[in-house]
Each structure stands twice: as C-alpha cells, then as structure tokens.
Image: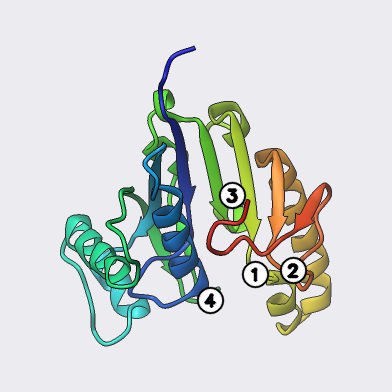
Amino acid sequence: MDNKKQHIAIFTTASLPWMTGTAVNPLFRAAFLAKDGSRKVTLVIPWLSLQHQKLVYPNNITFASPSEQQVYVRQWVQERVSFSPGFSIRFYPAKFAVDKRSILAVGDISEVIPDEEADVAVLEEPEHLTWFHHGKRWKTKFRLVIGIIHTNYLEYIKREKNGRIKAMGVKFINSWVVDIYCHKVIRLSAATQDYPNSIICNVHGVNP
C-alpha cells in the first residue's frame, strides 16, 4: 500500500462573505480536518458573477476574481482559529436564484476535483447540490460520498402557494437524489427531512 494521503473534498452551497451556515460551517470543517496534516483537504465553493455577487454579498463586498475571494475567505478563517489552516480552495461556476434565495451550481461540479484525487466527497446540502446534477455519478467518481443535511427545505416550500403539494414532490426528489449520490447521510438535527439510512449527529467542528 502506498503512503498517498487521503483526499477529502468538501463541496458546499455558499461562501463568505455571505454569513450563512453552509458558508461558515464547512469552512471550519475544512480547516480542522486539515489541521494535523495527515490528509489533503479541498473546500469547493461557488463562484458568482459580479452581478450575482451584488445580490448576495453584504456591505457591497464584491470580488473581481476567484483568487481575490479566496484571500478574503482565508483571512477570515485565519483570524478565528489558532493555527494556520492547510487546506486548498477551489471554485465551481454558480448562479443566484432569486426566487429560491439560493446559490445553484452550473454544470457538473464534481469535475473541479481531478479523478486521481477523487477519494472522499463531503456534500454539504447534498439535495441542494444535486437537484440539477449533470455528469458522472458522485458514487462512481468518489470512493465514499457523505451527505450532510443542513436545511429543511420542505418547511420553506410549505409556506408557498400550493406548498403542501409541492413539498410532497420535493420530498420525493430529495430522497431520490440523496440516495443516488450519497453512501452515507448525516442530518445535523431531527428538524431536517428524514432520509433512509441517515443518522442524526451535529458534526460541526469535527466530531469522530
């Protein structure tokens, strides 16, 4: 067996400076997973056009390039942990859907990680990341795919017109895509949608 380090790629649906849970928690997860240097960790975050950044990011903060945003993200986490985070950051093309108040991936975001590095994938909000997935199946590309459920989208949808009927459809689609794309599912709380073969565990920080 070779001594190649395990590679963990963390894909998430938002990035700083948008102070949302799926921007902040995966960032700390990446920092702490990479802390002891025993594994390679890559955080994969959305890149928005300038026009869409203005719709999402607070205080008129915008970035001319992914490298500029990367500097901002690194500086933010560096100021909040007591060590120098050793993870890398990559971006996938995305757009902001105003009606859903969500950032959506454009195209096959799994391509951001080369096949030779496709070891473990952590999908933060797998149902959100895979609603419009076009490309190779995550389970085919990665040896292990772990989905972390943050949000109960069904509760948001129930508030819309004809929400209860829509929620039934979305619940089915969510269960279907998560089952297709993930080997293991972790729900951060019991308030999230129930999924087959899922466990409830608050894995913020890095629990065992």
Query: Label 2, on which residue?
Result: 192
Badge 1 or badge 3: first in the primary sequence: 3
Give the amino acid at mark 2: Thr
Residue 66 shown left or right of residue 204 in the figure: left
Circle 4 sits in a helix, a strand or a loop, which is it?
A: loop
Circle 1 sits in a helix, a strand or a loop, which is it?
A: loop
- The answer to whether one can see residue 108 in this image is no
Q: Measured along the vertical axis of the image, is residue 101 above or below residue 11?
A: below
Proximity of marks 2 and 1: CB atoms separated by less than 8 Å = yes
Badge 2 or badge 1: first in the primary sequence: 1
Query: Label 4, on which residue?
Result: 99
Whole-percent x, y for residue 25 in the image: 49, 66
Closer-to-camera residue (135/178): 178
Q: Nearer the viewer, mark 1 or mark 3?
A: 1
Proximity of marks 4 and 3: CB atoms separated by less than 8 Å = no
Query: Label 1, on which residue?
Result: 151
- What separation in Å lies between label 3 and label 2 (alpha carbons)? 17 Å
Q: Nearer the viewer, mark 4 or mark 1?
A: 1
- What separation in Å lies between label 4 and label 1 (alpha carbons)? 17 Å
Closer-to-camera residue (47/30): 30
- What separation in Å lies between label 4 and label 2 (alpha carbons)? 21 Å
Q: Residues within 10 Å of mark 3 (few under 14, many from 20)?
A: many
Give the amino acid at mark 4: Asp
Whole-percent x, y for residue 101 in the image: 51, 76
Residue 155 shown left or right of residue 48 in the figure: right
Give the residue drawn at x 40%, y 22%. Answer: 4
